[in-house]
Amino acid sequence: MTSTLRGVAAAPGVARARIWRLPERGSDSAASGTEVGLSEAAERAATELEALRERLRSGGRGEESEIFGAQAMMAQDPELLDAAQRAIDQGRSANEAIRDAGEDAAATLAALDDELLAARAADVRDVAARIARILRGEQPPSLQQRSIAVALDLPPSITAELDPALLAGVALEAGSRTAHAAILSRALGIPAVVGARGLLDMAKDAQEIAVDGTTGEVFLDPDEDMLVEIERRTAAAGARAAADEALHDRPLQTADGHRVMLAANIGQPEDSKRAIEGGAEGVGLFRTEFMFMGRATAPDEATQTGAYAKVLESFGERPVVIRLIDLGGDKDLPYLPLPHEENPFLGVRALRLADAGHEALLLTQLRAILAAGEHTGRQPWIMAPMVADLSDVYRLHELVAMAAFGRTLGVQPKVGIMVEIPSVALVAELVAPEVAFFSIGTNDLTQYLLAADRTNPGLAERQDPLHPAVLRAIARVVEGGHAAGIPVAVCGEMAGDPAGAMALTGLGVDELSMDAGAFGAVKRALASASLTDLRGAAEQALHAESAKDVRAMFESMLAPEREAVG
Ligand code: PEP
Ligand code: MG
């Protein structure tokens, strides 16, 4: 009989295959007796990780590739290796010594009770396990046949290393939508369900598994009826993918031809290619902080100028929105120690760093953006995250003026803000005349409005931006922005969600910015309805009782895939 389990839908698609379990930790007895020393094993581990980084980067997955850049650095971390060497000197086997050192480092990080550091703890453990595996003379885990990986958690380095032609899906007992394994599965287009509590126990004796990464369901040893249902879902998912592809050359527009600008979210200059090939009309969000991660020091002005110029050049006449580094919250840097925060998402992050001793970091970035504009003759759009009110806007303009001091700018930058703190949404009409554009960050706006931590999988159902309260805030921002004659975009995950994109279009948003992988599904969603219908539904949504009701309403408007193509 089929056993069914529900977890968090982490990467869309349906797959059914044999179960592949992550091999248990290797023991000394498993060692083949190769004569690799600790430092050589660490070096080889770093080389393997660098190769993984390069593979992802050259495949246009710059943002995700940085996970491995950071891990390659960890593999060479003197503290980790010294601790292991001391244990070896005291007579422990190298295999055990490095793993213990990894465990100790991970435990120290995990004890800090911080979501981001906890994620880094998993990364250190993963790096130590890789060095230990090399010391034992073993090959990396690999798949022999088409399989679905089942594990407590799957280190991203293993997800990326498994043959994508054989890895049909991922099912994890731990993890959240923002966990590295989930991000990577989405980037690789592998259906994934994470946070499925009780999975390992239930899968103990199972042979086969099916995952529906769109609904978050997991089916163990599916019976005849379930196999028919899975076939149906697989065919529907395939038809959706084909329909999305067929819309490639069409602009983003409603059934009656109302155009919405389609922009891409990128994390590295290398992501531009995939975005342009997908049909991006510009960059709506360049998350520059990813360029600052996985390195020993901040990139200097010249390096940053080169990176921004590359993106400006790639997009030519099309607008490119470069966001000032959004550090703090769930992202920080080893070389920029920020004080411990009880509530990091409410702490000193992003623009607030300017008043906490890190003004120079922001000024260097601003100078690099202005220089990139001059070198390319293109107008950069500068965007500040975490703006709370007018005083933050004035501070932003002051910083831009300081960076421009002494330069004769051939092209003036456009200066705009992210609307992601509820306070600025509430005073949108006061702020709009002072900026060139708004871009709504629905990820943070939702977590702040609904007081639901975006990194907490237990609150996943409370984080739906289709909540009427979030929609009312967005409607207010659109109204305030349009009254001042500035464009209003959305660059949070909501823009790439078909139901979210429909609601936003109905609310009058001018631009939707998302990962290029979502372009097809969003085009299909907008092609399902006329602007009048979407406006009517959005109006109704503002007065709905729950996000669930709103989602059901927009999903019922989604045309079956074959009708949207025409
Ligand atoms: C957002 O908050 O919606 C956003 C786009 O920014 P980030 O996800 O980087 O915080
Ligand atoms: Mg944000």
Image (cartoon, rainbow, N blue to C red):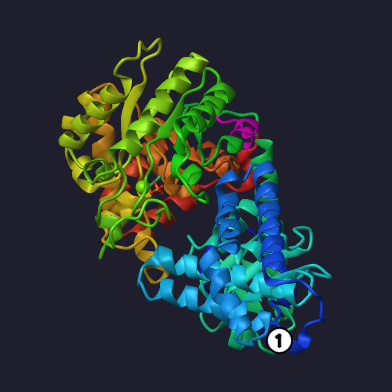
**Quadrant occupied by the C terminus:** top right
- Report if residue 514 is visible in the image: yes
- Magenta span has 442? no
Residue under the point 25% across and 47% down: 421
Dominant SS in magenta: helix
Asked whether 375 or 393 is in front, the reply is 375
Residue under the point 73% across and 71% down: 134
User: Mark 1 — residue?
Assistant: 27
Q: Quadrant of residue 77?
A: bottom right
Asked whether 82 or 68 is in front, the reply is 82
Is the residue marked by circle 1 packed among few (<14), some (14-19), or many (20+) residues within 10 Å? Answer: few
**Range of residues picked out in magenta:** 272-281
Residue 360: x, y in percent?
Answer: 31, 36
Q: Secondary structure at mark 1?
A: loop
> Is residue 329 shown left or right of residue 143?
left
Q: Is residue 553 above or below residue 301?
A: below
**Quadrant occupied by the N terminus:** bottom right
Q: Is mark 1 within 8 Å of ligand 1?
A: no
Residue 34: x, y in percent?
Answer: 82, 76
Question: Mark 1: which amino acid?
Answer: Ser
- Magenta span has 273? yes
Q: Quadrant of residue 387?
A: top left
Q: Is residue 179 above or below residue 279?
A: below
> Is residue 511 shown left or right of residue 226?
left
Residue 348: x, y in percent?
Answer: 25, 51
- Report if residue 3 is visible in the image: no
Asked whether 91 or 67 is in front, the reply is 91
Residue 145: x, y in percent?
Answer: 83, 69
